[in-house]
């Protein structure tokens, strides 16, 4: 039906031109040849062109779906990474608070020993007493600082090594799961 309508719409103007004076008759044959050529192309190319556009449409939809799936996977991985990061931050805070508590306890113990030393020194008299007090205080402060620094370094190293091992193990497990 559409083909007949197309032929009519193309042939009608050719017939109209053919009926007028001054327009050559071979023009109608050119139009008829053109219509036949277009009809032939339509007949030959209708199915391949239709299949091409159908396949192209399906390919585009598949690519859109793949892109959506990839985006969703990326968002899921981002949420997992954020969760791991927040968990690591909590662990670091716990370790830091533990180190602070241990440092305070150790500092109190050192201060108590220092007070004992100061009481012993106060019993002595004169210049010797003053020199011993100054040296003891200096030693106590130095000892407190050195021990606190060593203790904090040790705790941070342990915490850092432990945290790195946990993160590496979790990352390797996640990668192993993705590979499978």
Image (cartoon, helix red, strand yellow):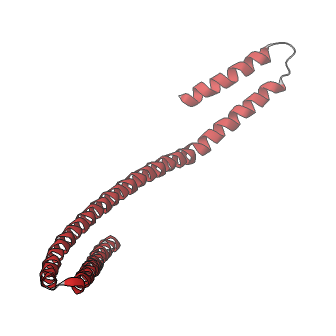
- Measured as percent of width and height from the top left, residue 38 is found at 67, 36
Write down the quadrant of residue 152 in the picture: bottom left
Q: Please name whichever residue, 73 or 117, is drawn nearer the observer in this view of the structure.
A: 117
User: Among all residues in the image, which is located at the extreme top?
Assistant: 21
Q: Is residue 60 left or right of residue 113?
A: right
The image shows residue 177, relative to residue 78, as above or below, that is below
* 6 vs 178, nearest the viewer: 178
- Residue at left 61%, top 27%? 6
Q: Is residue 16 above or below residue 74?
A: above
Q: Residue at left 74%, top 16%?
A: 16
Q: How many marks?
A: 0
Left/right placement of residue 53 relative to residue 8 reads: left
Q: Residue furthest front?
A: 126
Give residue 169's quadrant in the image: bottom left
The location of residue 98, given as percent across then percent down, is 18, 71
How far across and how far down the image is residue 45, in percent? Answer: 60, 44
For the point 37% across and 58% down, which residue is it? 74
Q: Please provide percent x and percent y for residue 117.
A: 15, 83
Q: Quadrant of the C terminus?
A: bottom left
Q: Residue at x 58, y 25 (%)?
A: 5
Q: Nearer the viewer, residue 121 or 82?
A: 121
User: Does residue 30 appear to the left or right of 133 in the view shown?
Assistant: right
Whether 16 is drawn above or below 98: the answer is: above
């Amino acid at each position: 039906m559409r083909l007949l309508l197309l032929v009519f719409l193309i042939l009608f103007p050719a017939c109209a031109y053919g009926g007028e004076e001054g327009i050559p008759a071979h023009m109608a044959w050119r139009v008829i040849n053109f219509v036949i050529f277009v009809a032939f192309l339509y007949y030959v190319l209708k199915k391949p062109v239709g299949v091409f556009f159908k396949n192209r449409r399906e390919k585009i939809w598949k690519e859109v779906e793949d892109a959506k799936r990839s985006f969703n996977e990326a968002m899921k991985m981002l949420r997992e990474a954020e969760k791991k990061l927040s968990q690591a931050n909590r662990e670091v805070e716990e370790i830091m608070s533990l180190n602070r508590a241990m440092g305070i306890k150790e500092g109190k113990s050192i201060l108590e020993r220092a007070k004992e030393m100061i009481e012993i020194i106060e019993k002595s008299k004169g210049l010797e007493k003053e020199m011993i007090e100054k040296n003891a205080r200096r030693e106590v402060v130095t000892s407190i600082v050195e021990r606190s620094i060593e203790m904090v370094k040790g705790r941070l190293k342990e915490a850092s090594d432990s945290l790195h091992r946990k993160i590496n193990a979790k990352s390797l497990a996640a990668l192993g799961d993705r590979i499978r």
